[in-house]
């Protein structure tokens, strides 16, 4: 070190550019896929059987508060519905944006509360100390939903998804 100058780490321009391009391409592709899935799910099913919802909750590993929203289609097969959602988490010195492509099977119920279970893949964008990393994940979920829209959901994540999530929310079905 001479004077006030600080030695800079040697950068590998080729690798840095390739890594940046690959992350940007992955982000663009996954964003386009999510938007396409949301559009298809919104317009492909009959309107009376669709819903949109909002959620808020907490996660573990990373320890965060998160909020988000979802769209749920009419049943694709029997009681199986496509329920893509986005969740944005803050805390633990990180910001996490999760694009979840989940399916939910709603079990038959005679009462006002309905139990559902499901899961699906996730694309997780994690920002930590100025760096953004993209990673895949898999979520398994279980929840209960009132026929008027209130719901509570528990998720277990693997790979790069948060280990555990608990949320409450409200879904509106339109006709």
Image (cartoon, rainbow, N blue to C red):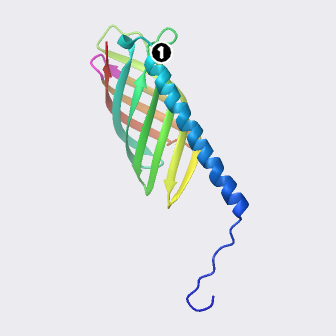
Label 1 sits on residue? 44
Which of the pair 32/149 is nearer the observer? 32
Q: Please tell me whether residue 79 is drawn above or below residue 71 in the rendered image.
A: above
Q: Residue furthest left?
A: 148
Report crowding for label 1: few under 14, some 14 to 19, many 20 or more residues within 10 A (C-alpha): few
Residue 67 sits in quarter: top left
Q: Please tell me whether residue 121 is drawn above or below residue 62 in the rendered image.
A: above
- Identify the residue shown where x is 39% and y is 50%: 90
Residue 159 sits in quarter: top right
Which of the pair 159/135 is nearer the observer? 135
Q: Is residue 29 magenta?
A: no
Q: Can I make out residue 137 in this image? A: no
Residue 87 rendering spot, x and y as whole percentages? 42, 39
Quadrant where the N terminus is found in the figure: bottom right
Q: Which residue lies furthest to the bottom in this view?
A: 3
Question: What is the magenta range?
Answer: 145-149
Residue 107 rendering spot, x and y as whole percentages? 43, 13
Number of on-image labels: 1
Q: Does the magenta stretch include residue 148?
A: yes
Residue 70 rendering spot, x and y as whole percentages? 40, 29
Looking at the image, residue 109 sits to the left or right of residue 41; the answer is left
Residue 5 rendering spot, x and y as whole percentages? 58, 85
Quadrant where the C terminus is found in the figure: top left
Residue 54 sits in quarter: top left
| SS assignment for the magenta stretch, majority | loop
Mark 1: which secondary structure? helix
Q: Can I make out residue 89 in this image? A: yes
Q: Please tell me whether residue 129 is drawn above or below residue 73 in the rendered image.
A: below
Q: Please tell me whether residue 98 is drawn above or below residue 5 in the rendered image.
A: above
């Amino acid at each position: 070190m001479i004077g006030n100058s600080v030695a800079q780490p040697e950068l590998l321009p080729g690798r840095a550019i390739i890594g940046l391009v690959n992350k940007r391409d992955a982000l663009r592709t996954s964003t386009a896929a999510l938007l396409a899935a949301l559009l298809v799910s919104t317009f492909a099913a009959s309107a009376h059987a669709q819903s949109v919802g909002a959620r808020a909750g907490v996660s573990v590993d990373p320890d965060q508060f998160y909020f988000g929203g979802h769209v749920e289609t009419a049943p694709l097969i029997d009681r199986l519905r496509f329920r893509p959602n986005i969740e944005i988490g803050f805390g633990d010195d990180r910001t996490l944006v999760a694009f979840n492509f989940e399916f939910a099977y709603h079990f038959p119920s005679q009462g006002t509360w309905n139990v559902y279970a499901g899961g699906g893949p996730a694309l997780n964008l994690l920002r930590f100390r100025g760096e953004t990393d993209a990673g895949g994940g898999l979520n398994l979920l279980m929840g209960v939903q009132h026929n008027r829209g209130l719901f509570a959901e528990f998720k277990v994540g693997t790979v790069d998804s948060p280990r555990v999530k608990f949320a409450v929310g409200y879904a509106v079905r339109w006709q």
